[in-house]
Image (cartoon, grey):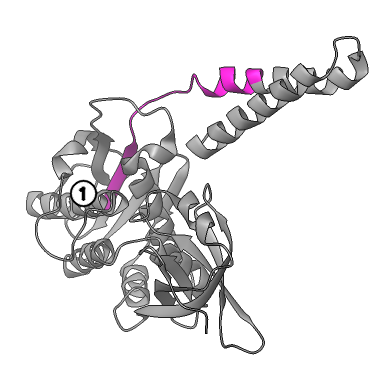
Amino acid sequence: MTYQEYQSLLAEQQTAQQILERIPAENVLDRGSFLTRLEEIKTILAKELTPDMSPARVRLTFKGKPVIGSHGILAEFGTKATKAFVDTIATMVAAFNGSLSMTGPIPNREQHPLLITGTAMGSFGFELEEYQATRQLFDDLNPVKQALEQTRLLLQSTLGSDDDELTEAVAAIDQRALTKIREFFELLIANEAVCVMGYREHTVEFHDMDEVRHSLDRISQDNVQETTREFDGAFLGVLPRRRTFEFAVSGTEPETVITGKIGPSISDGDELNNYLHKYMRIKVLETRVGRGRPRFVLDESPQLRSSP
């Protein structure tokens, strides 16, 4: 259960309780459906709020020239490859927290370290585990789990040929983190190695060097276009829990409506509902991969404008 789903259930529970308070006790039939739903919500909360709050774990294994069967891996390559992967995750975590610049040290990376807890079988590699000083009840509030999932989705998308799918994955990742993933691929190619990432029940596997080169080409700077754009118009709707928006662009015929995601720099997406149907200017990051449709991310608060 995500934090948003938990909040939604709490709101529904409160509404049902308020309605029940207004229905007389003798109206058994009217009260029945609300009492049943309240019991369902209590059951869901009792079950979902006692999850396995284990730390994030990921398996990273390698094959190729630096790997000696299942016996071992060249230390220099193993160290560099693991560091490149860990740097990617640390960069994503910093971006989720809204504290990442294009250059300089990755901020607060010591707060979310990954531990090597064992060697991973299959060829040769490592099992990495998040070090948690405190446990997170909701996975979507755990930045390391978010970063690992986004990395998995991106790696999986690079293996295919669907530009729209890859655009969706790239748009969710900070530019500096994307650079780290390119560096990871470049390291594999330079050492004639391939990798397998296992996270939760999912596995992303690169079978040969051609697949690694194909993936690097698909996220190359020549194939990924990111542009900052400004639009004048009005918000038609905002979904703060899903962190998405619809925006009608003025001066277009027929009317153009763009949809996009609310970036991490805007902590409270609900505040955008205060601007519905008001004339505004927004600044968004437009991402497009190959011939894929553009994706938009709103990373700055909108500006009120005078009506055209």
Q: Residue at x 47, y 71 (%)?
A: 295
Residue 126 magenta-drawn? no
188 displayed left or right of 40: left
Q: Position of residue 247 (x, y in %)?
A: 55, 70
Which of the two residues, 278 or 270, is positioned nearer the viewer here?
278
Q: Is residue 113 visible?
A: no
Residue 56 magenta-drawn? yes
Q: Residue at x 83, y 23 (%)?
A: 33
Disc count in the image? 1
255 displayed left or right of 308: right
Give the answer, above or below, for where 69 lies relative to 210: above
Give the answer, above or below, for where 161 lies relative to 199: below
Residue corresponding to mark 1: 86
Q: Residue at x 46, y 70 (%)?
A: 296
- Check disc 1 and give the amino acid type: Val
Give the answer, above or below, for where 121 lies relative to 9: below
Which of the two residues, 133 or 75, is positioned nearer the viewer here?
133
Q: Is residue 191 visible?
A: yes
Q: What is the span of residues highlighted in magenta in the rendered image? A: 42-62
Q: Position of residue 120 (x, y in %)?
A: 28, 38
